Structures are given as structure tokens and as C-alpha cells.
Image: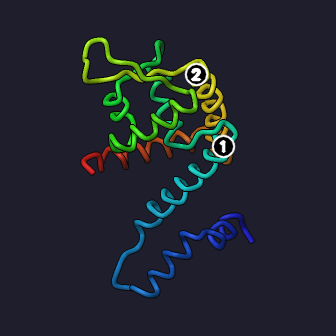
Amino acid sequence: MCQDAFVKENDVVERIIEQWRRERPDLDPSGKAVTGRVVRAADLIARKNQAAFAPLGIKGGEYSALSALRRGGAPYELSPSQMSEHLMVTSGGLSLMLDRLERAGLVRRRPHPEDRRSVLVSLTDDGLRTIDEAMTAHTAVEHEIVDGLTAKEISQLAGLLAKLLRTNSSS
């Protein structure tokens, strides 16, 4: 059996598309070839990242919050509203996440010196060490996931996904 036939035979998304073609021949399920695989890839990435983050005592959303602080550079400090711009979480969800990160000693909150109604969130030394370890693990997961692709394929896939997101940016 050739490699392409083996892949197709063992491709869950391909089987789902074929089943929908059989059950609903009036519909065109070809979009699932992309969306189904993107959903499955996102799930794979989330599971592998969670496994990588677990030894550090953080979850995916917490990684994102710590990462937003770290990417900003020293002094690794943002307001909650600035953090919300980087995260897909409600203000209430962010507040609960920051409570947990603060209890874990990874962030601290202090009054905003220019706005008494606001606070600034910053990484602690433990938070900086944790996010640096998490980023190392996260990068390893990313490389593991794309390891079966050539550099050209990675570039093509990245470009196509960027185009897909650009053309749907109002969503």
C-alpha cells in the first residue's frame, strides 16, 4: 500500500467527509478537509502543551497570561486591560486566573501609580523562571508537532493559515 493510500485510509477527517457525502449528498462537506483538521490540530496542540506545562503547575490559559507579561519585556508588567488584549478571556476570568497565579507566587499586583482605579500585574522571579521553562517546553512541543514537515511545507502551511485568518478577520 502506498504512503498516500495509508494516510487516507487512516485519516479520521477523510472518513467523516466520506460519511457525510454518503448521508447528505446534497451538501458539500469539502470545507471539513481544512476545518476538521484545524480543529483536530488545535486539540492535539492543546493536549501536548498541557502535558508539557503540567510539571510546572500551570495550565494553557495561565501560560498565555504569563507569556503576555514576559513578551512585553522588562519590567514584565501590564495592566489587566492590556493583558485582556492578548488573551481570549473575560475580565472576570482574567481576575480569577490572576488570583491563582498570585497565590502560586508567579505574579504580583500593585496599585497603578498613574490610575488609582487600576492595578499593574508583574512577574515575580518565580514567575519569570516558570514562564521561561514553559516557553522552552512550548517551543519543543511546536517543533515536535511540525517535525514531519519540511521547511518549505511549514512555510506554506503558515502562509495558508495566515491567509485563512486574514480573510476571516471580522469573525
Residue 84 disc label = none
Residue to which mark 2 is pinned? 128
Occupied quadrant, residue 109: top left
Q: From the viewer's perspective, is 152 left or right of 133?
A: left
Say which quadrant the N terminus sits in: bottom right
Residue depicted at x 37% and y 31%: 83
Occupied quadrant, residue 113: top left
Instruction: Report the front residue among 21 and 88.
Output: 88
Please name the colour scheme applied to the rendered image: rainbow
Occupied quadrant, residue 23: bottom left
- Near mark 2 (Cα within 10 A), the count class, few <14, some 14-19 or many ≥20, is some
148, above or below 30, in the image: above
Relative image position of residue 160 (x, y in whole percent): 43, 47
Identify the element where label 1 is drawn: helix
Residue depicted at x 48% and y 13%: 74
Q: From the viewer's perspective, is 124 left or right of 122?
A: right
Residue to which mark 1 is pinned? 54
